[in-house]
Amino acid sequence: MEKNTQCKPAEPKWIREGAHLLREGKLVVFPTETVYGIGANGLEPEAVKSIFVAKGRPQDNPLILHVASVDQIASLVREFPLEAQKLAEAFWPGPLTLILPKSDAVPFETSGGLDTVALRIPSHPVALQLLKEADLPVAAPSANRSGSPSPTNAEHVWEDLRGRVDLILDGGATQIGIESTVLSLVGTVPTILRPGAITAADLEPIIGEVALGSGVLSPLEETEPSLSPGTKYRHYAPKAQVFLVHGTGEKYAEFVNGKREENIWAMGFEEDLSLLKIPTVSYGREDDFPEQATKIFALLRELDHRGAGEIYIHAPKTTGDGLAIYNRLLRASAFQEIYV
Ligand code: TXA
Ligand code: MG
């Protein structure tokens, strides 16, 4: 059933209305410092189910519970180990999601049937205020239709979810642009299930060695039990065919300049622009990962609007700060990589 979606500026009056709607079991989209989230009461199975319907998301893909303060977490987990406490102190509020053993208070609808729960305190002032006023753990995946790029502004949300949610709080463009780092604290070694702005190098001084989940750089097999079910679906994908091209600026330019078909686009670094002779967009300087993070999802949407048939992206660095960008672009390209 089509909803009468309201899109309002994220001012105190509308944040209050959003909190009220969340308490009534409704769907409210709000900005976080990473991407926009589509929120519902995370302890209410019916409200949580409506998120999956609005997004068209597979039901076994678990959601992150967002809270305003660490005190709210005690009732949601079976244990809150010392590592989690240290990480909370260092990085919350902020773009880090922790996976811990869930308590019975968290419904299986929220955890996608898993015995664990994902938790995060976002730092965006609108998100924090909304969570405080709602006084509930809010389940919130990225506010895009399942499979399309995550939304970094309210126009993206409107495009994907108009008629499917009750309220969109417009807080302008998000600051980081890619989703939070997801870190599992359930196994023997803390494991990054989804890389983000907070990297292994940021985490290791606080909790020691961190492992990289097998889904970060490869598609998980259908049959492989997935630690982070979100990683097994094709993600962030525009309608165009996307290819990730590894090589120097010169080799990349030589390769894409040889393409003569229509509707072919290059998505390269700022430094590549002068070398490229086909339609091109830049996703930032080669070494500026924060800038790249703010641009990649919006550019993939924009190229869809421009009717791109094929997009050749100059691959970023695949390690360190580049890993999170590489991970998103790998998924957008459905793992189609070219080495030149
Ligand atoms: O930055 C973000 O994290 C944004 C904003 C809105 O907070 N949210 C977000 O949610 O990206 P979503 O649902 O699009 O991605 C959550 C990821 C998925 O890959 C999911 O599979 C994983 O976290 N996840 C959630 N709960 C999990 C659990 N219990 N165990 C393992 N992975 C989990
Ligand atoms: Mg998502």
Image (cartoon, rainbow, N blue to C red):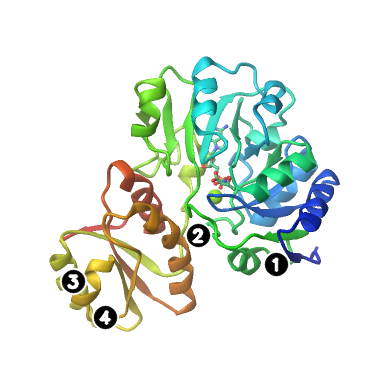
**How many C-alpha atoms fall within 10 Å of the one at disc 2: few (<14), some, or many (≥20)?**
many
- Which residue is depicted at the point 43% across and 17% down? 188
Q: Nearer the viewer, residue 247 or 273?
A: 273
Q: Tell me the kind of residue under disc 2.
A: Pro
User: How far apart, in angstroms, are the residues tagged by discs 3 and 2?
Assistant: 26 Å
- Residue assigned mark 2: 149
Q: In the figure, is residue 45 to the left or right of 218?
A: right
- Residue assigned mark 4: 278
Q: Tell me the kind of residue under disc 1.
A: Arg
- Residue assigned mark 1: 162
Would residue 226 be visible to someone looking at this image?
Answer: no
Q: Nearer the viewer, residue 243 or 93?
A: 93
Would residue 19 be visible to someone looking at this image?
Answer: yes
Q: Earlier in the sequence, mark 1 or mark 3?
A: 1
Asked whether the beta carbons under mark 4 and mark 2 sit within 8 Å of each other, the answer is no
- Residue assigned mark 3: 253
User: How far apart, in angstroms, are the residues tagged by discs 4 and 3?
Assistant: 9 Å
User: How far apart, in angstroms, are the residues tagged by discs 2 and 1?
Assistant: 16 Å
Q: Earlier in the sequence, mark 4 or mark 3?
A: 3
The x and y percentages for residue 323 are: 33, 45
Q: In the figure, is residue 204 to the left or right of 46?
A: left
The x and y percentages for residue 164 are: 73, 61
The x and y percentages for residue 153 are: 57, 63
Asked whether the beta carbons under mark 1 and mark 4 sit within 8 Å of each other, the answer is no
